[in-house]
Amino acid sequence: MLRRLQLLVLVVVLVVAAFSTGLPFLFFLVYVGLLVGGGSYVLTRLGLSDLEAGYAVSQLTGHVGDRLRVTYTLRNTGRMPKPWLEVHNPTTLPGGLTGRALSLGGRKERSWLVRAPLLRRGHFRIEPLMIRTGDPFGFFEATAAVGQGISLVVYPRIDALPLWRLPPANIEGAHASPERTLQTTPLATAVRPYAPGDAMNRIHWRSTARLGEIQVKEFDLEQTADAWLFLDLEAAAETGEGDRSTTEVGVRAAASIAAKALGENRAVGLTASVHRLTVLPADRGARQRLKILQLLAAVEADGPVPLSEALLTGLNRLRRGMTAIVVTATDDPAFIRPLATLRSRGIGCVVVLLDQSAFADDTDPAAAETRRQRVRAVRYTLAEFELPTYMIGPDQPLEEALA
């Protein structure tokens, strides 16, 4: 805009000077200015004509550590070449998507691939493709938006936990088959839409009436101990930054443990202590896995409620034979007493404790020592009540910490 104003002022001054003095040289400069300005305007106006463009993403969901592949295609259907084009995708993804400046001859096509690493979990947006062109002098420019924006969900990374085992509970069965049985058993665990061939006696009439379409029951071969995850994201207890924060490591631990339990055909429930207490009822299978990952992709460390209060609210949901798994970074031992009462109810318990003193970057030696003492006090109290505990540090692989 500034250069366009400068060009206009220059042309006006030259026209006034030329007609005032009548010098041929000034008229020559006026003609050159009009030619340059007019040519630049026409070139810019034609720069985006006869263009076809588009982009395609390889996936709409992914995990931290995956690579998103975006394929771009730009085609010039006219005879006139396009000497300068700038192509880019505005996005909220950390690191963005690499743009490209290129020229395109007549009747030519260009395609290229951009690989973008997924660095952080969350919900992100990729806006429509933006194409910009202009003249060589920078007086004019034209832009166009192509396509529609898309939403991308990045789930937390799931680590393999080959040595992780839940503590035995009163209903600890053998390793259950991950496939649901076609036979009718005493253990009806879920419902699904009716499919041709399903028996009439498997119809779940209450779900059918509620959803407005026929739902049938699904059965498991044997009963296994269910798990309930309590993810503590109290804002006052979170320390560290980025991937080395207790928030990210805790979310990753919860996702990995849930994936391991669901892979063993256990029903898994989740209570997340965020800005409001969020509860996912216990269920099993791929649908529950997706629900848990979607929740964990969006949670932040903004919980106002201490873990002890969240446990008093959520432990009533547990029944005999279940296992409570608490993932927390708190150094307040008040949460331990509610867990100590679970044994008398026939409920197993395990605590995954994030070492707050290791995650915190305390510059004051006295503050660092105080934090270490509080963490040691929590560990001592957990041992006193004989609660199984796993400690996780900022740079420790989960498969080792949870072995």
Image (tube, rainbow, N blue to C red):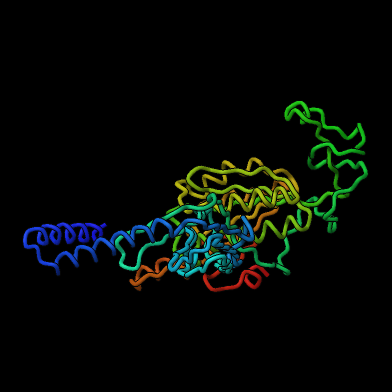
Residue 41, percent from left and from top:
34, 58
From this viewpoint, is residue 379 visible?
Answer: no
Please say if 390 is above or below 320: below
Quarter of image, res 351: bottom right
From the viewer's side, name the closer residue of 179 and 104.
104
Quarter of image, res 396: bottom right
Residue occupying the point 56% across, 60% down: 77
Residue 121, percent from left and from top:
54, 59
139 displayed left or right of 261? left
From this viewpoint, is residue 208 visible?
Answer: yes
8 displayed left or right of 217? left
Quarter of image, res 192: top right
Quadrant, the C terminus: bottom right
From the viewer's side, name the closer residue of 258 and 388.
258
Quadrant, the N terminus: bottom left
Residue occupying the point 31% across, 64% down: 138
From the viewer's side, name the closer residue of 153 and 7.
7
From the viewer's side, name the closer residue of 284 and 11.
11
Looking at this view, name the residue that lies furthest to the top: 209
24 displayed left or right of 316? left
Residue 277, percent from left and from top:
53, 43
Please say if 138 is above or below 206: below
